Amino acid sequence: MLSQESLQQIDREVAKYPADQKQSAVMAALRIAQVEKGWLPQELIAFIADYLEMPAIAAYEVASFYNMYDLEPVGKHKITVCTNLPCALSGGVHAADYVKQKLGIDFNETTADGKFTLKEGECMGACGDAPVLLVNNHHMCSWMTKEKIDQLLADLESK
Amino acid sequence: MLEIEIDGQQIQVPDGSTVMDAAAKIGSYIPHFCYHKKLSIAANCRMCLVQVEKAPKPLPACATPVTNGMKVWTHSESAVKAQKGVMEFLLINHPLDCPICDQGGECQLQDLAVGYGGSQSRYQEEKRVVLNKNLGSLVATDMTRCINCTRCVRFTTEIAGEMELGQAFRGEHAEIMPFVEKTVDSELSGNIIDLCPVGALTSKPFRFAARTWELSRRKSVSPHDSLGANLIVQTKHDVVKRVLPLENEAINECWLSDKDRFSYEALNSAERLQRPQIKQGGEWREVDWQTALEFAANGLRGIAQQHGGQGLGALLSPHATVEELYLGQKLMRGLGTDNVDFRLRQTDFRADGRRSGAPWLGMPIAGVGELDRLLVIGSFLRKDAPLLAQRVRQAAKRGLQVGVVGPTAEEWLLPVRSRMVVPPSGMVSALGQLVRALSEQKSVVVSEAFVSSLPAAVSEEASTLARLVGSGERVAIWLGNLAVQHSQAAELEALACEIGRLSGGRAGVIGEAANSVGGYLAGAVPSGTGLNAKGMIDSPRKGYVLLAAEPDLDFADAPRTQAALQSAEIVVSLSAFDSPALRESADVLLPIAPFSETSGTFVNCEGRAQSFNAVAKPLGECRPGWKVLRVLGTLLGLNDFAYEDSEAVSKAALGADYTRKLAGGETFHVAEAASVTDSGAGLERVADVPIYFADPVVRRSAPLQKTKDAAVPVARLSPATLAQLGVSSGERVRVGQGSGTVELVAAADETLAAGCVRIAAAHRTTAALGALSGRLSVERA
């Protein structure tokens, strides 16, 4: 179900824990799986659970708890805007509204061309940089004014 | 010990106690939802907040350990304020639908809302809605009512041994669910209904059937497995509506297996026999009791006069009560025969007269918690005795090490440290190796009786397993149903006793049915020259008395049993249920009451006699079995049948100190060879009696028959054996055993020993196969 490379990465994570506690690596394993497949279909979660010798529902608990795991397909670029209180006080909601207007989609929607998905995020631990947003879970963007959002979207569009 | 003051009362509690434990000790009730004494502590409902001296905030009583000199107030102004605050939050998303909720009247949330809830809600926004889940045919869901206490999640994980439910999503989106589209298939699943403090999980069969206050609560005892779980049977207008556990720490704790809980659905099934019937000229005719009883008595008397008492035989069910079994055997002995037996699925009786008494578990059920080594021989433990397996599961967490010998390594959801997977024909040798290895490891001399027959070499597996068994201080050796039904059961039992002697432990038998011990105590076994269950089939009798047993499903060899019964001149069948096979075999059908409609006694595997009363009036013209036998005895002019009540019968059956009649577990010697010798060719049959096929009552419980455990039997083979046969999993195969042939679907089973076919017994699709063990052929259909 996963490439040899991903499995090797998972094995490396598993090796960090005692042999009878393989399930400790579930978060890393789900992350690695999502990087390869783009999102986490149920069969993939079941596969990871099986691989780590844990109940499927326990892996699903983790996958559904953290909002960086995607349980549904997402576009090529996933933009997650933080709307928690500190961000909201510094324009987070406005930034989100601007992205919505630019892309013509609401939260949890994907553009028709499959390029962008917009998500509402939770605190990213950089309240001083508000408003912040996250691209594809790995790239964080700070002080997102309208200009910077224009620039970001243009960059992503061309990728 | 720690000193603590709760609500002004000074008490001492053991180290490690929580405030909740301490409060329970003085009888002070702290409101709670997620806390349960048998489950791990979650502290997520926050209802049990109490005031603790010097703590700045209220603390959850269930998760706060007692410290020395602690001062706690459970009902102070601050505590109650906190509890009321929690209640307001819990009610925010809880629907106000008590009038249409099945939990109404027995709902912890409803009860506590009376004390701690506001009369009006300050919450004006929309409540959340959670989609219902399909958990199978036993548990109904209304997930919007869920307060996320996670008791059900913890139960499946900790007690049932497999996490079948989980809490997915987060915060206000959190919901309890199985993994996508899965059902809850545990044999203990019904307990989550009791555990749910709200109406989120309710009983599907009982749904909307009655309100708790309309029901009478009566105590009873489960007639199914050998544990004898204590029941509260709830009835309305003499109809059993629901079964709940009666807490008994020594037996079932606060749990019930689904078999005990949902079998009641069969009590009012259309297949209940309601009127006496006789067969005349091949036609069945309903008659009154007098006619039927006289017909039966005359038939039996006729055989006794013509062929002597030896012409008769009685085959009694191990699920029958002590009273029925006692009067059944007394009837036969009165008619001048010792041909009486209740061990219908057993084939080897050579241990009779050699073991010192009635085989039983050899220890109290609650003693499982204190064991440190357990050897289980030839058992389908998890499905055959679900609550015993549950005890082993808990004990394993505290350090009990389990070893297993048997033809399958099926999943028991508990850690098995060491096992020998051997085909049935290899089990005697496996135990022999264990005996040899133990004697070498412990430097104890093997009993003389075994010296000559022990295998010369000891395998690596046997020596590992022997080290496990031999290294314990409190050791038990249990023989399961497969071992007892084995064609060399006597050797297995003798060797188990010897293993017990060598390891300083105690051998015992788990037992197949509610009265597997009681039958022995009631004398429902042949003595002297009397024929046992197998003998009565092998050399057919002219007349039979059949008690609560179905010829095609309850015997070791169904086709031969049916043939023997059909060739008899008269078969008197006392049964609660009707069936085509019974009609083919019997000449008189006497409707007797199932456990719910008769008083009686079961002796469970730990040798505890538990008497119970009827919880409902007999259906139709049914009569309690012991009364029918009493009248039959009187009609036949036999002495001493004038018992006043069932208590008098059980007193006569068990005597003052019946526990003296239990086997001591001493090693014994089997001299003569087994009657069935292994031909050595073909595949070996491994037959389990699936949990929901095991007795006439459970077979007719519709909700249980819809579960996965009641699936139509398949022919399970190890992948290697499948490959040898050139058959792939899912294909249909023709299975032949003796003269019987059936067609089944083949399935790969990696847990099975090579060269074996596991085919469930006690099902109509496999009944034609006959013996529960032996060789059979498998080919593609």
Image (spheres, coloured by chain):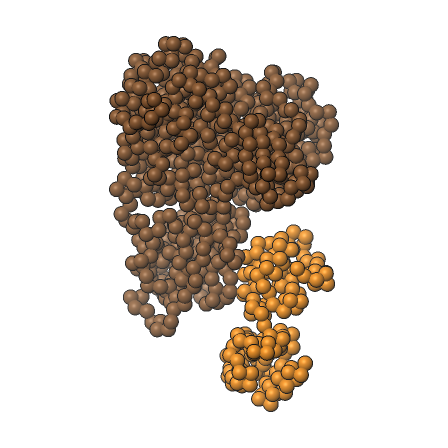
Q: Residue at x 62, y 54 (%)?
A: A50
Residue B214 visible, this orientation: yes
Report the quarter where the C terminus of chain B lies.
Answer: top right
Q: Position of residue B43 (x, y in %)?
A: 47, 58
Q: Residue at x 62, y 35 (%)?
A: B778
User: Picture quarter containing residue B462?
Assistant: top right
Q: Position of residue B378 (x, y in %)?
A: 58, 33
Q: Residue at x 34, y 54 (%)?
A: B103
- Above or below residue B508? Residue B539 is above
Q: Residue at x 38, y 9 (%)?
A: B306
Residue B656 visible, this orientation: no
User: Picture quarter containing residue B487?
Assistant: top right
Q: Position of residue B699 (x, y in %)?
A: 43, 38
Q: Nearer the viewer, residue B755 or B238?
A: B755
Q: Colour of chain B?
A: brown
In the rendered image, the residue lying farthest to the bottom is A147
Q: Position of residue B195 (x, y in %)?
A: 42, 51
- Above or below residue B81? Residue B533 is above
Q: Which chain is orange?
A: A
